[in-house]
Image: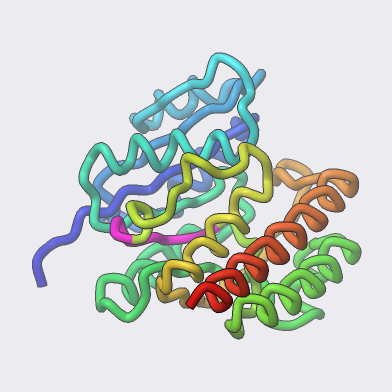
Amino acid sequence: MEKQKIIVIMPAYNAGKTLEKTVRDIPQGIVDEIILVDDGSNDDTVKIAQKLKLTVFSHPANLGYGGNQKTCYWEALKRKPDIVVMIHPDYQYDATLTEEMVRPILQNRFDIMLGSRIRTREEVLAGGMPWWKYYGNRFLTIAENIFLGLNLSEYHTGFRAYSAKALKTIPFMRMSNNFVFDQQLLISAVANKLRIGEIPVPVRYFPEASSANFYNSVEYGLSTLFNLFHHLLYKQTKLFNK
């Protein structure tokens, strides 16, 4: 099989304490380039990224999680990759599984791969996920499976792989700059009939790992439900106009 070009993107905000560990876990020889976009950090994230010889872009002001990803994907697509992998640089996800994430896309079985943290309730809670975040994750995942007609174990992971075709199909530049960006992207993928798969990944929660607080999580959940209803209306309108 011809060598495919794989780019890792890292949307970063105050990731100085965890960035190097995350980068070191990415298997050697798999990735052609790592792009880090710093979203107005006030720590040494940029300095460490430069030391690690990553390709670094810096926002002069904080644009939000979705705004950060827009720059990540835009810059990645300029390099004409075959696959783009998002890994949060907060060491919450096991980057050693990068090859497992991209393999199903290389084999043309899926267009998008998700690294699911949800294998068992015991494992997730033992890994440090707050109970309110776990049950919110479960509620939203059930709702999304019903609305989108899928059977995924999690939609809210920050460890994802996309084929270039998927990113070129999804109008991500028109989406939110906030946390709901991830869900808008997957809803759009379903609307465009892209194939979504997943593999299990261990969960790691600790003080240095970035995580939305309770109030941001509530806003995120409500925004996700709003976007699901919008998707349902879109589908009904299409059926009505046939």
Describe residue 22's horizontal placement relative to residue 178 as left or right. left
Q: How many marks?
A: 0
The residue positioned 51% from the left and 41% from the top of the image is: 174
Quadrant of the image for the N terminus? Answer: bottom left
Q: Position of residue 137 (x, y in %)?
A: 77, 67
Looking at the image, what colour scheme do you see?
rainbow
Out of 186 and 230, give the one closest to the viewer: 230
Residue 189 shown left or right of residue 157 in the figure: left
Image check: 38 left or right of 179? left
Furthest residue in direction top, as rendered: 60
Give the magenta part as a residue range: 159-165
Give how far across and how far down residue 185 sits, in percent: 53, 56
Look at the magenta stretch and give its main secondary structure.
strand
**Is residue 31 highlighted in magenta?**
no
**Residue at the (89%, 45%) spot, across then down:** 215
Relative to 110, is 184 above or below?
above
Q: Position of residue 134 (x, y in %)?
A: 82, 68
Residue 160 included in the magenta stretch of the image = yes
Find residue 67 and report its image quarter.
top right
- Residue shown at 69%/58% (left/top)? 227
Residue located at (35% from left, 30% from top): 55
Of all residues, the one furthest to the front in this rendering is: 241
146 vs 15: above or below: below
80 in relation to 82, above or below: above
Where does the image place residue 151, in percent across and percent down from the top left? 61, 85
Vertical side of 146 occupied by 175: above or below = above
